[in-house]
Amino acid sequence: MIGWLKGHIINTWKNGARTGIVLSCYGVGYEVQVLRRNLESINKSKEITLWTHQIQREDGAYLIGFSRKYDRDLFRKLISVSGVGTQLAIALLENKEGNTLVDVITQKKIDHLVKCPGIGKRTAERLVVELHNKLVEFSNATIDSKPTRANQEGDLNIDIANEVKSALINLDYKETEIENAFRKYEKHAKSKLSETGDNDQVPQILDFETLFKQSLIIINTETR
């Protein structure tokens, strides 16, 4: 089972609604289907990393790749549901960001699910019935109502920081810019905690989207 790849893009491809890349890793070219939104954010001249899921079929094997481990693991949960195949799971993740999709399922918002192409009411109901109590780790990964002491003090979650760093490098930002943005955001969080003494007012660096967006703001503000 191939679960992770690191390399350079040597080609991109499209087959109907499917999009993908050929990733060169130590002299081997891996053909990987990716989300369209991931492909749009990838800088083709830079080394990238993908979290992958390998599909084994009678006529061969193929790979599905994701920029975030969070999305790869959520994809695996989705295809565990009866009637949800690989392409339908990809359609769900194309339609909604991973953390938004988790919220929709856990809050049993069937009307939101049926808006996704290919998802009928019965499939939406199965997703809710089978998964609404099985996505706790995904909810905790994005929203932590009881932050640890490290997070209260504004410290970065290392795994999230590494994912954000990889994504920003793929967008052609420099490593020094990214690390500087991380330091400034940590300093801001700790300063706010010191000034207010109110943990609820401290920006919680617990999810990919928050750190990604705040880092972009800091980098782009300083380069104006």
Image: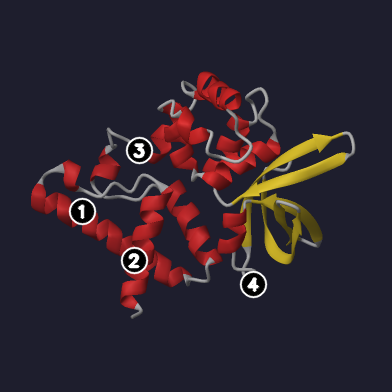
Residue under numbered circle 1? 190
Residue under numbered circle 3? 143
Residue under numbered circle 2? 217
Q: Earlier in the sequence, mark 1 or mark 3?
A: 3
Q: Kindly check if marks 4 and 1 are in contact, taking CB atoms under 8 A apart as contact.
A: no
- Image quadrant containing the N terminus: top right
Compute the Cα span from label 4 to label 2. 24 Å
Compute the Cα span from label 4 to label 3. 34 Å
Colouring chosen for the image of the structure = secondary structure
Q: Earlier in the sequence, mark 2 or mark 1?
A: 1
Is 116 placed left or right of 181 in the picture? right
> What's the residue type where badge 3 is placed?
Ile
- Nearest the camera: 17 or 100? 17
In front: label 2 or label 1: 2
Compute the Cα span from label 1 to label 3. 19 Å
Residue under numbered circle 4? 45
Q: Earlier in the sequence, mark 4 or mark 3?
A: 4
In front: label 1 or label 3: 3
Is 193 placed left or right of 19 in the picture? left
- The x and y percentages for residue 166 are 52, 59
* Residue at image location 28% in from the left, 64% down from the top: 184
